[in-house]
Structure formats: structure tokens, C-alpha cells
Image (cartoon, helix red, strand yellow):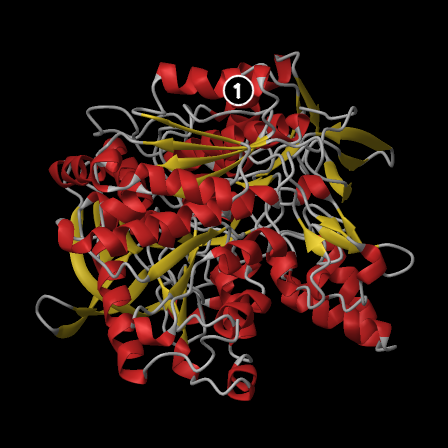
Amino acid sequence: MADNKFAAYICTGCGLGDVLNVAGLEKVAKTEGKMAVIKNHPFLCNAEGVKMIQDDIANEGVTHLCIAACSRRAKAEAFNFPTVAMSRANLREGVIWIVSEGSDHDEIRQEMAEDYVRMGCAEVKKMTLPGGNKKESSSKKILVVGGGMSGMTAAQSAADAGYDVVLVEKTGALGGFANQMWKRMPFNAPYAEAQATGAAELAAAISSNPKIKVYLNSTVAETAGAPGRFAVKIAQESGNVSEELCGAIVQASGFSTYDIAKLPELGGGQPNVVDQAGLEALAKAANGGPIKRADGKEVKSVVFVQCAGQRDDSGTHLPYCSGHCCGTSIKQATYFKDQNPAIDTVVMYQDLRVPGMGEDFYRSAQNKGVIFTKGKASKVTGGESCTVAFKDLILDEDTTAEADLVVLATGQVPNAGVDLDEWTATVTAAESGDEAAKAKKVELQNISVLNMNYRQGPDIPQLKYGFADSHFICFPYETRRTGIYAAGPMRRPMDMHQATEDAVGATLKAIQAAENAALGRAAHPRAWDLSFPKARLEGCTQCKRCTVECPFGAIDEDEKRFPLFNEERCRRCGTCMGACPVRVISFENYSCDSVGMQVKAVNVPDEDEEKPRILVLACENDAYPALDMAGMQRLTYSAYVRVIPVRCLGSVNTVWITDALGAGYDGVMMMGCQKGENYQCHFVKGSEMAYYRLSKIGDTLKGMGLEPERMQTYEIAITDGARVAKLINEYVEQLNALGPSPMKGFG
């Protein structure tokens, strides 16, 4: 501490100097914050203000600074001082923009501002400058698993960006499902005709690219390490095992078509009933000529049955819509009409889903004579010709249709690897001696895509229906395994155009991960963060809560069962810190102490002052931006709240709550992201874990003689600016009804 020099800089611009007593804020920073340097400036974020701070860092030896100005989410580029530790006190969005104007509110506004200065000074005193986690052996090579259109596009995109690529394909040729296709849906104007797949051309370009090493007839035998140092063993058909050091991974393992044999009621298994993949094979064999059945008969009539084994709410088949199937049936219907307009071609649908330019393709097919009828098929019987029994949804009557060939739109099943819940249960049973479980474990290992040696299991987690973990709102392409990104139909159902676009996005994220790893920085969403977790092992009780609760598999255990951090896997959410009951885990710039000192820095009025204090712990990803939006919209909320942004609700240690309530705070509001199946938590399970921990705090509050209502949790979206202001005001009213905390005066 002797070599540290602390400074506070107070901005008077944006109206701050007009409504706040700046001299009073400076006094707080000096006498209570113990800042060695205190300065104000009319515009801290302009060139002159920034230079003033830079000069103090260079010439005055400032090592820690508190900037009291606008939200920490604003002016991040201006206030970028990488050589010092820094805190931000939010006086603009968090004070003057949310407190009612006028001299009647001068006192309460000033109290709020002074508290935030105290908090900012207290926070920075518990921070050290993050040094990053650079590894000298860091690799920027991109591993792509899967050689279909998604995988090839990912590999080509990475190579075009200047990165070396390793592409692993389990079959003997690149192209994947596209190799089975005659044509693809249109992706260029006028969106009227099916187009060539382009798979062969892309495969040739991949094979001749000097930056791309291709392994055919190969699988990933083991994935170890972390971003920047993934040690990957690649098993080849020859028996050889190659090793590659990679910086990030794109998994593009594709999909399988739903097994038509599971649909006997719709003719699955009959010779003249095929799925969409089967029809592609017939069309490719015809090569633009007449399409013939397996028995060699030329097809003169065809019925396409949509949603075959999809959108099934019985639990028997796929519950979801695969998205591409309507467009694919339109494409395949034009195969027949382009060859012979006289062929009777019917598409039977419940809902026809062709968004965007798909409407143009649909109209083109109509103009060619394709008949679209709204109906739901119930039975298909085979023979020389097929009979489709269906309910006409327009006329509301049961009827039949005859056809030489029936095509079932069966949908996509992701090839995402092993379901980790099944894996965990199987491994547990196998370890207990269950022979059937041992055999099942081997079976699961054979379907694993990445074969990771993570304690959480060999593949990336899965969300609904077996699709790879990747949240569509918060982090497309991201998985719970840092540095590993999902692309294409193994992530969600999609057509070829969507899959190739998806692959480009996943590749860019993989490149970002590799570059960040080389710089010692975190991954999404804290991609600028150079901190990483540290544990004071002498105080560790080996409870394993940190290893179990980490959403990203970033913590293993050493030979003595102490936590072992894989820093490059860490997203810096702080869930481990919140989980630790003895508070031995911290980050250089975020710790139990750094937040705890902010809690304690607030001036809590006595009971007779009738000024409650409410602590708001706000997730920095959604809740804190929502509070900023409330300020930007000039929505007033109670000036009795004191907001502390937290990286994630998962990082909240219950000691902060008990300390606050014990110090006389009247209430605590926890604001985090939506949890559960449709979670919006940027750290996946952070909100869920916080809710679980806090569900057990009731006994603690009871022991303190406090009502459970004094601690409340709320799910907040980033767009909830108006709602969050309303919630605060309503909560203050609730606390007023409860009365002051009985703990006032004991803190």
C-alpha cells in the first residue's frame, strides 16, 4: 500500500456542477476516502480532462483512481487507463438524472452523491491492477470439427482472416449433407429458382488452401486445456493419432434426419415413401431428367407431407419445427415441375413457414403449378401407388389423395454429442459396478464429438431437444465451454444459407477467444477484463462448491482436492466467489472486500432521520443498464437507494446482504437476469444459483430479528428502464410500511 497513490477526479459537466456541491464531494473524497489527489474538471472526458489524469499518472505516481462522473458504462474509451486500477462513481445517470429537480431535493441529492463518492473511493482501495493471464505458448490456430457446409465455411472464413485452421471430418469427403443434395434453396435475387449447392467448389477451395490442414476419416479423440492452449488429439482411420495445439474450437458437427422408420403410420419403411433426403438422392440420380422411384417407375404424381414427426406434442416424435422443411419441400416440388409441368405435385401443410424472401420462392412454385393444400395427414398406405388419408383443414373434412411417391418432411436431429445429464448418471452407475452402465459409458464415448477431459463431461452441454448449448438472445454461438463455439444445425434447426452465415459468426467469436487468450483477457461478455480468480488455499475447506457451481468448467481439483483454476476458461462472472462460504476466492479488481467496503462506506442515517437506506445489487449485464436507461429517460426513483453493480448475481456472497442489514440498511434489492429454461443470464446459471443461495437466507434474517421482506429479488431485462424505477419506488413504500430496520445504530 505504501507505493500506492490514490486520486479522485470529479466531473462538473453534464449539469453535475450546477446541482451538486462539488466542494462537499471533494471534502468527502479527502477526509473519508483518504484520496491523496483530488481534482475537478468541467469535462473530464474531453481531451483536456483525460490529459490531466494521464499527467497525474505519469508525473505524480497515481496508481489508483476514482472517477466521479457518469455511469461506468459511458465514456469507457475516454476513461481507459490500462496502467492503473480504477473505480467509477455514477453521479450522472445514478444521481442527478433520477432525483427530482429543484432546490427542495438538494439535500437528498447531495447525500446520494457523497455516498457514491465514498463507495467509489472504498472500492478502489481494495483493488489491484489486473495483470492478465498471458501464456507464452498461446496458439491462435482454429480447430473446426465437422466438414459440412457449416464447417467448411468456418474453416474458409478463419483462413481468409489470416488464421491457420485444422479441419476434422469423420467421413472420407468434405461436404456433409450438402453432398447428398441435388440443389439448394435460392439465396440470391430473384429467389425464384433452386440453385447449385456449391459444396464441391468450396471443398476444392478448402483442400487447396495452404492455411487449412484437413483430416478426413478422423475424429477428435481428446480435447484438453483451455482457450489458447487446447491440446487436441485427432484419431485417424489409419490408427495414427496426431496432436494439434489450438486457440479456439468451432463445433459444426451438423445433423441427422429424423428416422423415417419411426413413422409407420405415415408410410415410413414403405418403398414408395421417402424423406426429403431420400428425394434428394433420387433427384441427384436423375441429374435433371425424370425422377424415378426405387422400382424404376417414373414419378407422375407426388405428395409432400409437412411436419412429419415434427411439432408433435404427444412426446413421441420431435416437438419442434425444423424451420427449413417448408422451403425444402417447395424446392423439391419444383424439381418435378421443372422436369415436367404435367406432374401432379401437391404440398400438404398445416402451416407454411417461408419467411423473408422465401415468399418469392413460394410464389414462383405456385406459378409453376405446384398445388399447396392445407391439411393434416393421418395415414399413408403403400403399394403400386400410395394413398394419403388426411383432414382437409379448409373444408374441415376427411379425404384422401393418391400419388406415385410420398415425401415426408421429417426434420433435423442435432449431432451435438453426449447429453451430459445422461453421461453423469451413467458414469456414477458405472463407478458403482453396474455392468450395463459400463457398456453404456463406452457407447456414449463413441458418440462424443469433442471427447473433452473436463470433469463436467466429454461434450458441450445441451439445451432443449439435444441442440448444443447456445443462447439465442445473450450469446449466439457461445457455449458453456469457453473458447468452444457451436455453428450450424447442431445449434438450432436451420437451412443451408442460415448455416453458412452462422458459421461465419461462430468463427469470428472463435478468433476473438484466441486473441483474448493471447492477451490474457476474459471471453464474452467481459472481453476486456484482465483479471482472473485467485484462491487463498490456506483458508479453503475443500467444500467443492466452486468447482460444482462454475457454469463454464473452469475449475478442477488438484491432487490435494483444492480448487485448480483454468484461468483461460474463466469468464470472470464471479460465481465461484459467491459460492465460497469462507470467502477465499477473489479477483484483483472484484472481491468480497471490494464490494463489502462499498456497502460499509454508505452513511446510514439514524432511525429518527426517517431516511431509509436500500442496497441494490444490480447485475451489470441487464439490471445496471436498465437503471442507466431510467436515468437517461429522466425517470425519478427513490434517492434512498444505493446501487452497486455486480458482475452477475451468481457472484453475490450472502455476507454482503447480512453485513448491509446488520449495518442498519432497511432493505436489499437483488436485480438479476431471467433464470430457468428460457434464461437470459449471460453466465447461464448465475441468477439461478443466486436465487438458490438466497432462498436459504430466511433463517439468518429471522435470527437477526428481521422480516424476510427486507430482502427481495427481481428478474430484470435490459429494456426494463421504466419498470426498474417503478419497482424501486414500490419497494421503498413497502419498507416504509414495515418501518425502520431494528438494526439501526448497531452497525
Can you give x and y, in whole percent of width and height, for residue 615 in the image? 41, 63
Can residue 340 be seen in the rendering of this structure?
Answer: no
Residue underneath mark 1: 56
At x 29%, y 72%, the residue is 610
Can you give x and y, in whole percent of width and height, for residue 2 in the image? 72, 34
Q: Nearer the viewer, residue 579 or 428?
A: 579
Q: Quadrant of the N terminus?
A: top right
Local crowd size for mark 1, using a 10 Å CA cut-off: few (<14), some (14–19), many (≥20): some
Residue type, numbered disc 1: Asp
At x 81%, y 62%, the residue is 539
Can you give x and y, in whole percent of width and height, for residue 236 in the image? 80, 35
Rendered position, 158 above or below 306 = above
Rendered position, 134 above or below 620 = above
Q: Nearer the viewer, residue 466 or 567?
A: 567
Can residue 129 be seen in the rendering of this structure?
Answer: yes
Can you give x and y, in whole percent of width and height, for residue 389 in the image? 26, 70
Q: Quadrant of residue 409?
A: bottom left
Say whether residue 389 is left or right of residue 450.
left
